[in-house]
Amino acid sequence: DLGKARLVRPPERFLARLVTRGDEKLRSLITGRGRPGLNYKRYVARYNSGIKTLPITAPETDRRYWLEMHPAYAAQRGLHQGDPVRITSHHGTVIANVSLNDHVPHEFPFLDFVPGEANRLTDYLDADRFTNQSLIKRTPIRVELLTPQERALWMAPDRETLCQVVALLAEHYRGVYPTAEEETRFARGEEGAPDWLPLTRLQQPQTVSEQQLAINVGAFAAFLQRIADDTIMNNAKTVHGPVYGAETGQNNVHGTYRQAAAQLMQGFTAQERDQFLTILLPLLKKLDYDALMLPILSDLIGPIPLRCADGTVTQANLHDAHQSAVIELKEEVVAVQLFMAMKHGLELLYGKGVPVPQEEIAVISGIRIPCAADIPAYYMGISPAHMEATRLIHCAQLGAYAITVVDRKSNRAVKIETTTGILPRDRELLRLR
């Protein structure tokens, strides 16, 4: 009837989760705009397209992410102003700094959702079935001080800590998926495939081994979040904070963390690189950091110097090459392979770290997908449509499923065979399309 509201009972599974506490450390996270009672009208970002034109009024130098907590509850938990803490939910892990704030309820921590990290804690698929609104106001979380491993990787990309964390996670991953077939079933999300790192165990570890696993995942998440912060600020062309102050000891120079992490990753041994790449993609997906795949791979691989016709030297990198290519779905993996093949071939021809003269190289690409011409064209500084026999040939019959890099001045060439895993009639690619 008109004028009467209709009350609808939530799904049983949702009600069961609300009444099941199970852990005294669990608290309900509230998210919203701004910081209650503290600079609530000062924004470092805007939430949606409808208000993007409004001013950014907060100081851009302070990039700390604040968790607002009532002083009495923080004291009860042994937390102080500025302490970096780990926030873990059923969906992900985030690190933030404690802000003592008596404007928030006693046992209900509050996060500003505008900076975006809150989205790693809330499950956007777990939405209200009537409004399709994500359940962002009542997320069960645990708030804890950082472990020594997390703190070490939060302060700086510490090599010893990162390698230990990666080795333990890779060993666990291989224990869960001892064969390639089992790993493939997990990667494809097939029904019945064991789930690596169920987030409920990370939030509420029951055994010593689960606690150790949660510590290592938290440490890797700290590494990812610091790289993500540098990457976001670099893309925004603004000055990086975080002005974390003496209580955290973090550097306030933009890009410092990511630059140091890149040097660390490029210095991996073959075994360390294999372990890192084994867990990288599964963890990026599990922790909701998919957008970091290309930046991290680009930093891991490193750039290659190119000398342009006017004599200037630029640095070609995987991320920019990937962005320049016209690719779809599975082809992005091939773009990574082709960049690596080209880089390897050029380093064999000219030497590692030696600027490559763009005008002197030519390429024969024998890979049967469009981006197999886009990536070589990026290296040569030309359009993919600029195909002439003296510079770029894209032909499977001539290329024989390989990339051939030619030094036209010295008449030397290097052929790099490439197994792409994508065939002209690839059923999986067709299904994805």
Image (cartoon, rainbow, N blue to C red):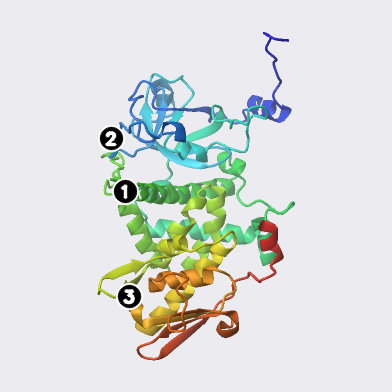
**Quarter assignment of residue 333:** bottom right
Q: Position of residue 232 (x, y in %)?
A: 39, 47
Query: Could you tell me how far apart the alpha carbons at marks 3 and 1 are, in whole angstroms?
Result: 27 Å
Q: Earlier in the sequence, mark 2 or mark 1?
A: 2
Q: Earlier in the sequence, mark 3 or mark 1?
A: 1
What amino acid type is highlighted by mark number 3? Answer: Gly
Q: Secondary structure at mark 2?
A: loop
Give neighbour class at mark 2: few <14, some 14-19, many 20+ (Cα, 10 Å).
few
What amino acid type is highlighted by mark number 2? Answer: Pro
**Quarter assignment of residue 147:** top left
Observer-nearest residue: 423 or 297? 423
Query: Could you tell me how far apart the alpha carbons at marks 3 and 2 are, in whole angstroms?
Result: 39 Å
Q: Secondary structure at mark 3?
A: loop
Give neighbour class at mark 1: few <14, some 14-19, many 20+ (Cα, 10 Å).
few
Query: In this figure, which residue is indicated by the disc labeled 1?
Result: 237
How many circles with numbers are drawn on the protein? 3
What amino acid type is highlighted by mark number 1? Answer: Lys
Residue 353 badge? 3
Q: Secondary structure at mark 1?
A: loop
Query: In this figure, which residue is indicated by the disc labeled 2?
Result: 59
> Taking the image as drawn, is residue 206 in sight?
no
